[in-house]
Image (cartoon, grey):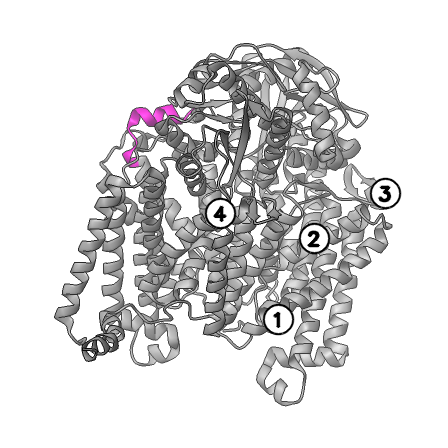
Amino acid sequence: MEEHHRRNQILTVIAVGIGLLFLYGAQEYATSYQIRILNNCALFVILAASYNLINGVTGQFSLEPNAFVAIGAYTSALLTLTPAEKQLSFIIEPIMWPLGVLHAPFFISLLAAGVVTAFVGFLMGFPVFRVRGDYLAIVTLGFGEVVRVVANNTQTITNGPLGLKGIAPHTNLWWSWGIAIITVFFIARLVRSSFGRAMKAVKYDETAAEAVGINAFWHKMLAFTTSAFFEGVGGGILAHLITTISPTLFTFFLTFNLLIMIVVGGLGSTTGACIAAIIVTFGGEYLRFVEEPINFWFIHIPAIPGMRMVIFSIILILMMIFARNGIMGTKEFSWNWVLNKIKPVKIFLRKKP
Amino acid sequence: MEPTVFAQQLINGISLGSLYGLIAIGYTMVYGILRLINFAHGDVMMMGCFFAFYGIMMFSLPWWASFIIALVLTGLLGVLIDRGAYRPVRNAPRISALITAIGVSFLLENAGLVVFGGRQKAFYRPEIFSEVHTIGGVRFLELLIWVPIITLLILAVILFIIYKTKVGRAMRCISHDMETTRLMGVDVNRVIAITFAVGSVAAAAGGIMWAMRYPQINPLMGIIPGLKAFVAAVLGGIGNVAGAMIGGLLLGLAEILLVAIRPDLSGYRDAIAFAILILILIFRPTGLMGEKLPE
Amino acid sequence: MRKLFICFVALSLVFCFAGPTFAAKGTVKIGVYLPMTGPVAAYGQMEWAGVQTANKIMPTVLGKKVELFLVDTKSDKIEAANAVDRLIKKNKVHAIIGEAISGNTLAGGPIADKAKIPMVSPTATNPLVTQNREYVFRVCFIDPFQGEMAAKYAAEKLGAKKAAILVDIAQDYCVGLANFFAKSFIKHGGKVVATAYCQTLDQDFTAQLSSIMAAKPDVLYMPNYYTEVALACKQAAELGLNVPVFTADGAQAPELITIGGKDVEGIIFTGHFAKEAAATELAKKYIDAYEKDTGKEASAFDALGADAYFVLMDAITRAKSVKGDKIRAALASTKNFKAVSGIINIGEDGNAIKSLVLLNVKDGQFRYLATLNP
């Protein structure tokens, strides 16, 4: 058991409370642009934390989140769209029978998104975890592509490349951050449980883990399915945030974004992934100035559209070379650490008078 | 299906597959020696095409001179990428190298979009490759005859380097045990740099052939051929240079024949490559030409 | 190692002091959100070039300077939504031009609609884009009109009875057009004998073309973007497929000819403007200015980018105001505006109603064939 468990719990509750107060303020006073960025932060916290579970914690480097997010987004969007709206959208091929009449409230649709995606993840796990290492990365990348190709082709389900539109903008700060907090708590608990310790054992040495009686396959499956569940829920949040989805949204670029986040946060650290998700999301918006014309005293640099992606790629490479552990390494945020850092300051202040 | 149509489709498949194979050779060679999936292989290939393009367009070189210069430049680019990005992570976990490779791939693509622009450019196809031959109602391009010749040439050169030269022996040693090779007094970094140079030259050669077949280049052109070439390499048994060619041919034929038999399913064509990849890895992870699967 | 990372962070912090300068007061601000990177970067970059040229031709409106703000969408919906919100809230633009792709315009549209900032898309052809969106307009054709006109021409003028279709399944633009062409062609008594699919970034179409050949069509309809059309035409010629090829405005770019060479000779398409039969003064002016600016021939993409700009300027002039609702009202009542791509009327739902120009490729040039009216 951790030191000062009770105190830390209280501190966490207080921190969450302050966070919620901040969100309340944002909801009331921030501009829609700021709210949008905050929503994106929450969305990427959900996606990065769950992606990190399989990639960082369990050490199974895979590249499929775009597939999971796609499945979740389509499931939940098809459920919340009213039958009339669906008819309006499917102008080329009519929608398949049961999907056309199904309708569910937002929360149910999110749950369904999670369950459906987790189920797909579960099925995918059987073939996928027969390989490991680089091969696993490529196979999962392949799955991502297959899901996108299928989404383009099954017009009676997904409306093909036309996509779905007019999805109700249910996602607000409460929903996005609420789900984000639940996700992070659940994953953090899972990582600290005996399952999580087994996952870490699989990461460091699969053979040794097997030798001490850990079933590596089922722990990978557990991590993968859990990750899929939350990616799916995240997909639902995403669909109701930008109100339109189509297969072009779920390309490898999305996975690349998430990969940067978990690498910056430190592969294996859930809190690191969250911090990085927020930094990268804000940073992406902030870095837009590099694409605008810059007037620095008398030096005039013309606008270079596209520079942001170049910078992101360079950051990823530099991180790998110079700061492979990212912000947090495999460590987690803990109150003990924070308080230990503050302690010398306190002592110093106390001595002063 | 009529026999001529079928024959034509077979030729289409061979024509596409031999290009996949050609690109896969460089891919599989680098993997065989370093156990690194060079994610950026397709993008290196793209750079080779752009070097050749600018050689012809901006410096008005004759096409063959421009192609040779492009090969050299791409080889240097390969060395540069190795020096700048892969060498610093050589002793890190393998996953770091893979992530770095993904970063290099995105860097080349996006820098390409900024520097070259996203608009497609017409690639020059020399007249001597453009002739269309007809044999018994089956038509094919002169280029089709040249692709296997070039492929075999590159294959011969690579096999020669690997099996008949001192550097090649060092490469084979590295593939078995990098640390021991180093202890034996081999300058491992130099040998790996040469590996990347050769691999990149092969990529550029493949890219230029590809660009002559499909005479259009843009900074994102390497993505699909790169992925397909990887599948071809796995299909042939990754690390096996000769297997890559066969894998390429099979993949090309599979894709074309799917479309030929069921044109209504042609939208699923890109999924085929990955479905094959997944099946191969599950049922015969060593590939068709089967070396042992590295952990 | 860690220190280097910190240095890097510090360096990027230094950068922020070199941030952008603030815009001068009293300008008309136009936001532009286009894909400058990502899979469809080519179209975004072309349209941006068109908007810039248009801005040079008409740098002021209502006596004020027009200032352009470009935001990249990375060809992505999340970024597109961010971009629109950013343009409205941070740059405080008066109107917006974009996006190139329907899917991304669908993501940006509702935000502009809610903020009551008018948005004009150059090339979002999907009918859903302007559906129930008061503030979203477009200057391109919508898919049904173009598909029907092509089918009518193929059936009546070319006398085609059997059509084959090769369509890019990953683009809503292509799928929409192919669908409306097929429906309309059947209505005109024709038959679709083969449909094959490809995907954006595909470069090999031999398998699809060979099976189309086996079906012996009278006409091949390929409503795809110019690169795919050019490559497919080249491969069709190599395979000996000798039927008229019909395509759509996505092919109207000089690259069609530079890539396709002699193999695109004779290809017919429904486009926006013809150089030698420029319908308006503005078109002549624009085509010259664009060539001078970029050294390239004007394409449908940049012309539509320019038209989005010109239509907006016209609306602002008539509205005599930069207020969102005023511009919107003026945009909605656009009548007979002589734009680059023909005479534009904005109909209900914010869609452009304009005549269509039929062109073909002859001697390595786009040639004017006919004008088709809606």
Q: Is residue C185 above or below residue A134?
A: above
Which numbered disc flags the more N-terminal residue, 1 or 2?
A: 2
User: What residue does disc 1 label?
Assistant: B32
Residue B80: % across, % down: 67, 67
Looking at the rendered image, the disc whose residue lies closer to the viewer, 4 or 1, is 4
Q: Is residue A219 above or below residue C192?
A: below
Quadrant location, the C terminus of chain C: top right
Q: Chain of mark 1?
A: B
How far is the residue under mark 1 from the one under mark 3? 37 Å
Q: Chain of mark 4?
A: A
User: What residue does disc 3 label?
Assistant: B127
Looking at the rendered image, the disc whose residue lies closer to the viewer, 3 or 4, is 4
The amino acid type, in three-letter code, at marker 2 is Leu
Q: Is residue B86 above or below residue C74?
A: below
Q: Residue at x 53, y 29 (%)?
A: C173
Magenta residues span: A79-91
Using the rendered image, report if marks 4 and 2 lie on a common chain: no
User: What residue does disc 4 label?
Assistant: A288
- For this rendering, which residue is in front, A93 or C110? C110
At numbered mark 4, what does the secondary structure look like: helix, strand or loop? helix
Using the rendered image, report if marks 4 and 1 lie on a common chain: no
At numbered mark 1, what does the secondary structure look like: helix, strand or loop? helix
User: What residue does disc 2 label?
Assistant: B19
**Quarter where residue B125 is shown:** top right
